Image (cartoon, rainbow, N blue to C red):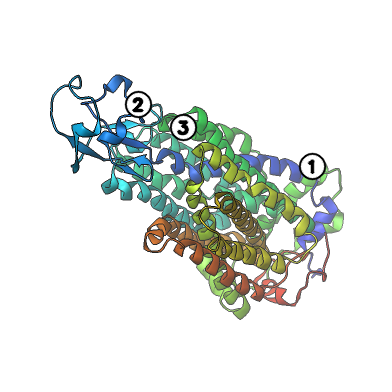
């Protein structure tokens, strides 16, 4: 039998990041942007609105303004804003011509509930005003939208990972985009809250795995030294996709048209994504060597390289990286997972990785949700908050190629944790310092999140890479379910959310030290190779 041939050696022959890989990554821009749309669309469609009671004694429906000079006489104020669902009772119940709308016209000792409202932005339409989800008793319905979305994403990551590892990355990508876009469009025609909520669950359940699938599809086609650049590109594109949502929201104020603007391009993109190449590593891990050879020859031609005869002969006559003879090529996920549990280090690594994903997701989304405390236009704030992720993504390309993965992950999480805790010592009056610390915290956790994606893809074997990445990400989604509840903790003790973010980030940082170093190390193809990563160091292998 011929000596084992590593796929990274084959990449050296065809080019580790040539025209073929570049074209593949340009195609992956589309699912990355569409995933950003899917991931945060509810932030705008289920956005709460500013409103106050309509006072028929003092105004007409046609020209009613949100803020008026006489309003404090008729409506109680909370934190310098008119109450949303309460007003003072008028002493008389006659026409508006009689009242002067002064404090003496209203009984400030009698506060009553109202059911007709004046909105600050009359053009804005979300499910709040269309499905009558106003006032405190309906707040849980609004927050439930984000929770349902996160639950569906967690389930989708597991199901998508299983499907992708079983039937291929390409088909998983096309189906997730097609089904997700279709359900997103259908959601724009919801006739009531219940229909909207069901579709809010189904759309991410069947369509939200496009990010991890696109990431794996692109990551497995490039050499070790280009993995960081590949991930940096993914992060930049995703952040730009999120910022694009804020730009669209500036011009499209109706939630139905907003969903159409987000999801219709997804269906159109299928015509372009059909030419995406399947993952060669996945084909080889499934024993489909002939199909893999065809793609490798296409890649070599596109990169103006030549695939050697010895390599072609090897793939034609050998089972690529088949370590365990009794484990069939089409083994189920649970059979493969049982193989992982045979290795102590790999099992511990999976547990720690899952905890780190939970930490990153909870802190990332927790800080994002807390961004509503920043002053200014909410769309502009959203754009700035998403764009602050780009510096970290760009720096990642330089840092990870010069410093060890493990130490970089440790430092980014520790810095985020320290910044969150330091924020607690800043006086409330120094709002600009609070804003700066918030942005730096968000930048640190965004950087950590990007590193974790790369790290997770590098510490698990090829035949389980997407499934275990999806499993860790699914557990991480529990963090996005917990994050919306942080405002409730703040009512118990205002510093509690930031205290929790900082503490769990620091704890997670120290667990990272148990991980192996994978910088410039070949991706493991088998469970035993992944187990033995413990012996590798940052400088041990700088292969292309």
User: Which residue is disc 1 drawn over?
Assistant: 19
Quarter the C terminus occupies: bottom right
Quarter the N terminus occupies: bottom right
Q: Which is in the foreground here, disc 2 or disc 3?
A: 2
User: Tag 2, which secondary structure?
Assistant: loop
User: Which residue is disc 3 drawn over?
Assistant: 258
User: Which residue is disc 2 drawn over?
Assistant: 65
Observer-nearest of 252 and 310? 252
Q: Vertical placement of 253 versus 445: above or below?
A: above
Residue 209 left/right relative to 52: right
As measured in the structure, the alpha-carbon distance from the residue carrying label 2 to the one carrying label 1 is 58 Å
Residue 394 image point, x, y percent: 72, 49
Residue 303 image point, x, y percent: 83, 44
Mark 2 and mark 1 lie on one chain; the one further toward the N terminus is: 1
Mark 2 and mark 3 lie on one chain; the one further toward the N terminus is: 2
Q: Vertical placement of 529 versus 477: above or below?
A: below
């Amino acid at each position: 039998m011929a000596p084992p041939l590593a796929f990274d050696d084959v990449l050296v022959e065809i080019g580790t990041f040539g025209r073929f890989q570049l074209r593949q990554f340009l195609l992956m821009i589309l699912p990355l942007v569409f995933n950003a749309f899917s991931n945060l669309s509810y932030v705008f469609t289920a956005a709460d609105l500013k409103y106050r009671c309509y006072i028929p004694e003092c105004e007409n429906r046609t020209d009613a303004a949100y803020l008026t000079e006489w309003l404090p006489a008729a409506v109680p104020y909370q934190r310098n804003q008119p109450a949303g669902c309460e007003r003072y009772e008028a002493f008389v119940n006659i026409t508006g011509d009689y009242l002067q709308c002064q404090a003496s016209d209203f009984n400030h000792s009698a506060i009553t509930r109202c059911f007709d409202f004046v909105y600050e932005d009359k053009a804005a339409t979300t499910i709040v005003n269309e499905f009558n989800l106003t006032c405190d008793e309906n707040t849980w319905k609004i927050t439930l939208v984000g929770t349902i979305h996160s639950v569906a994403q967690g389930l989708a990551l597991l199901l998508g990972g299983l499907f992708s590892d079983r039937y291929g990355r390409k088909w998983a990508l096309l189906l997730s985009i097609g089904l997700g876009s279709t359900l997103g469009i259908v959601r724009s025609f919801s006739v009531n809250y219940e229909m909207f909520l069901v579709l809010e669950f189904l759309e991410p359940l069947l369509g939200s795995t496009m990010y991890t699938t696109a990431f794996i599809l692109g990551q497995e086609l490039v050499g070790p030294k280009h993995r960081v650049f590949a991930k940096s590109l993914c992060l930049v594109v995703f952040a730009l996709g999120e910022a694009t949502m804020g730009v669209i929201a500036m011009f499209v104020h109706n939630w139905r048209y907003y969903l159409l603007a987000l999801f219709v391009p997804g269906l159109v993109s299928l015509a372009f994504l059909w030419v995406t190449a399947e993952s060669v590593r996945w084909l080889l891990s499934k024993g489909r060597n002939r199909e893999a050879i065809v793609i490798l020859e296409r890649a070599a031609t596109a990169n103006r390289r030549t695939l050697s005869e010895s390599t072609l002969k090897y793939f034609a006559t050998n089972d690529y990286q088949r370590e365990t003879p009794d484990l069939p090529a089409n083994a189920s996920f649970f059979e493969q997972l049982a193989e992982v549990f045979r290795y102590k280090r790999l099992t511990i690594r999976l547990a720690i990785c899952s905890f780190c994903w939970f930490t990153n997701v909870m802190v990332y989304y927790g800080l994002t949700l807390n961004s509503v405390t920043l002053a200014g236009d909410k769309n502009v704030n959203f754009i700035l908050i998403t764009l602050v992720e780009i510096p970290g993504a760009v720096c990642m390309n330089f840092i990870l190629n010069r410093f060890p993965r493990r130490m970089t992950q440790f430092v980014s999480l520790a810095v985020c944790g320290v910044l969150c805790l330091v924020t607690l010592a800043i006086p409330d009056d120094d709002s600009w310092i609070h804003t700066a610390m918030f942005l730096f915290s968000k930048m640190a956790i965004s950087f950590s999140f990007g590193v974790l994606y790369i790290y997770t893809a590098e510490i698990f074997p090829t035949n389980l890479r997407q499934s275990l990445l999806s499993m860790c990400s699914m557990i991480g989604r529990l963090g996005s379910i917990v994050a919306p509840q942080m405002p409730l903790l703040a009512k118990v003790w205002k510093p509690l959310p930031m205290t929790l973010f900082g503490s769990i980030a620091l704890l997670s940082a120290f667990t990272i030290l148990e991980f192996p170093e994978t910088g410039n190390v070949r991706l493991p193809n088998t469970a035993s190779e992944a187990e033995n990563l413990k012996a590798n160091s940052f400088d041990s292998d700088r292969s292309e």
